[in-house]
Image: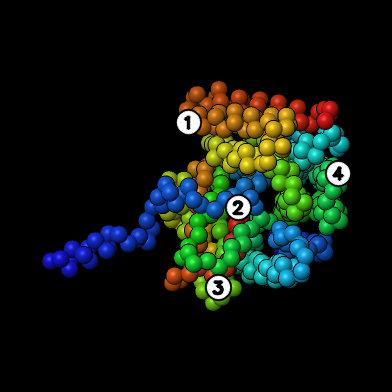
């Protein structure tokens, strides 16, 4: 009897195939910058499924390619990569090339190597050939190379700002797409509070000197506000308050950061 | 025909930039660390190429490969869990490869920690699991080896 009880206890204690993860396991999961942070192109692929918008309607005016600080440069590089993804969705080769040139100008300002600068040519070539799928991958490869170069230079703050810039611009666009869509399907796509929290945690791990700069503080505040709005999304009528709030917070930080300012 | 043309165009137009992601290892005096870093970069590059082999067939099905990937050294742990942020409605394939002849087992869990039903593909030393994200959120991908230890592996994903 004791032997049977012992065997039953052993079976109960052994994790079975298909067992649910515990909270502890989920909290200890690996967070990899290059994989845990998705690309805005993934959000845009989902928006296309919900109802293909007029992507060209999300273009913005050209932004400066010279900024007072490297943090601001990095943020705007990230935002521009998202603009590149929008141009790919619009299948607008000229817009892709224009944005590609600006991305490379900002990358040069950050002091990256020739490998990254060579991407500018391949982006132009793919845009001319209309190879949209390759362009998505090339844009991501470009931004990843810049991020890795920044980490190699022990400038993790810049890598974090690139990711934050890319996603804040993506959420500005996503919120606008959800407003235009008017249905809950696009709103559901914006339930990315965990991603906003992860981007914040990246900024909060920075050395105090970087963390306390006005630029990082503003970006952190925007991510906090957007995270709160995203958490409040419920798939009900109340989303009609939170979606514009996400959009306007994102729009404000994108506009503020793309304006020239004193260092 | 159009997909084949796209793939061929991609191969022809791809710049001759370094295909491998170099590890972020700063050089130190002595040279031993330089050699170790170079060895790691080579293993990383080879494993990524092996992971892309199983992903290759999926590219033809209009999936986009993420440039970013995870490279984990061998460990005493029997499995590793990676957090990923997925978007509702997208289809994902997570692909992994090990250098040894051990086929990894992949499981994807939803934000509540529940395992998802998945399509599975595998080959010696390679595995892929396909899922559709029902909701936007933080999901988890578990990579298991066989036995007590997990060998060195590379993991990346594709989306559509």
Q: Secondary structure at mark 4?
A: helix
State the residue in front, A155 or A83: A155
Q: Is circle 3 on the same chain as circle 4? A: no
Q: Is circle 2 on the same chain as circle 1? A: yes
**Residue found at x 43% / y 49%:** A24
Give the distance between the C-alpha atoms of the residues marked 2 and 4, in whole angstroms.
26 Å
Q: Estimate the x, y position of residue B18 in percent, counting from the top left.
A: 78, 63
Give the distance between the C-alpha atoms of the residues marked 1 and 3, in whole angstroms.
42 Å
State the residue in front, B124 or A113: A113
In the picture of the structure, the residue carrying the numbered disc 2 is A32
Q: Secondary structure at mark 3?
A: loop
Q: Earlier in the sequence, mark 2 or mark 1?
A: 2
From the viewer's perspective, is residue B73 above or below residue A98? below
In the picture of the structure, the residue carrying the numbered disc 4 is A109
Residue at the farthest left position? A1
The mark closer to the camera, 1 or 4, is 4
**Residue found at x 81% / y 36%:** A69
Mark drawn on residue B140 = none
Label 4, residues with CA under 10 Å away: few <14, some 14-19, many ≥20: some
Give the distance between the C-alpha atoms of the residues marked 2 and 1, in whole angstroms.
28 Å
Q: Estimate the x, y position of residue B12 in percent, counting from the top left.
A: 81, 64
From the viewer's perspective, is residue A110 above or below residue A258? below
Q: Is circle 1 on the same chain as circle 4? A: yes
Q: Earlier in the sequence, mark 2 or mark 4?
A: 2
Q: How is the image coloured?
A: rainbow
Q: Estimate the x, y position of residue A197 in percent, counting from the top left.
A: 57, 38
**Do the residues under discs 1 and 3 have CB atoms within 8 angstroms?**
no
From the viewer's perspective, is residue A59 above or below residue A10? above
């Amino acid at each position: 009897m004791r032997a049977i009880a012992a065997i039953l206890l052993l079976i109960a204690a052994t994790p079975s195939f298909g067992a649910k993860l515990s909270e502890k396991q989920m909290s200890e999961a690996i967070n990899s910058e290059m994989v845990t942070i998705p690309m805005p192109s993934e959000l845009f692929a989902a928006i296309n499924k919900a109802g293909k918008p007029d992507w060209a309607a999300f273009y913005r005016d050209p932004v400066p390619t010279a900024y007072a600080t490297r943090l601001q440069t990095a943020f705007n590089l990230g935002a521009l990569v998202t603009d590149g993804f929008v141009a790919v969705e619009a299948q607008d080769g000229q817009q892709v090339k224009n944005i590609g040139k600006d991305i490379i100008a900002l990358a040069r300002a950050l002091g990256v190597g020739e490998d990254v600068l060579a991407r500018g040519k391949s982006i132009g070539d793919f845009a001319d050939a209309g190879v949209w799928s390759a362009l998505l991958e090339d844009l991501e490869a470009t931004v990843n190379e810049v991020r890795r170069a920044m980490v190699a230079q022990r400038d993790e703050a810049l890598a974090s700002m690139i990711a934050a810039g890319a996603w804040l611009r993506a959420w500005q666009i996503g919120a606008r797409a959800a407003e235009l869509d008017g249905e809950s399907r696009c709103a559901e796509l914006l339930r990315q509070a965990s991603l906003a929290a992860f981007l914040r945690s990246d900024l909060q791990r920075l050395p105090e000197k970087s963390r306390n700069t006005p630029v990082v503080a503003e970006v952190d505040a925007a991510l906090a506000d957007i995270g709160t709005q995203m958490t409040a999304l419920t798939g009900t009528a109340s989303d009609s308050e939170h979606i514009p709030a996400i959009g306007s917070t994102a729009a404000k930080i994108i506009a503020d950061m793309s304006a020239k300012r004193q260092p | 025909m159009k997909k084949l043309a796209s793939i061929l165009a991609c191969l022809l137009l791809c710049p001759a930039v370094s295909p491998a992601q170099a590890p972020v290892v700063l050089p130190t005096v002595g040279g031993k660390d330089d050699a170790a870093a170079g060895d790691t970069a080579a293993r990383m590059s080879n494993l990524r190429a092996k992971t892309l082999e199983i992903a290759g067939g999926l590219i033809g099905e209009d999936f986009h490969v993420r440039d970013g990937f995870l490279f984990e050294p061998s460990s005493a742990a029997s499995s590793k869990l990676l957090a990923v942020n997925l978007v509702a409605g997208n289809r994902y394939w997570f692909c992994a490869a090990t250098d040894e002849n051990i086929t990894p087992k992949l499981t994807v869990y939803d934000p509540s920690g529940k395992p998802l039903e998945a399509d599975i593909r595998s080959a010696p030393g390679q595995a892929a699991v396909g899922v559709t994200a029902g909701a936007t959120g933080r999901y988890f991908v578990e990579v298991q080896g066989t036995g007590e230890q997990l060998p060195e592996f590379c993991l990346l994903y594709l989306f559509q």
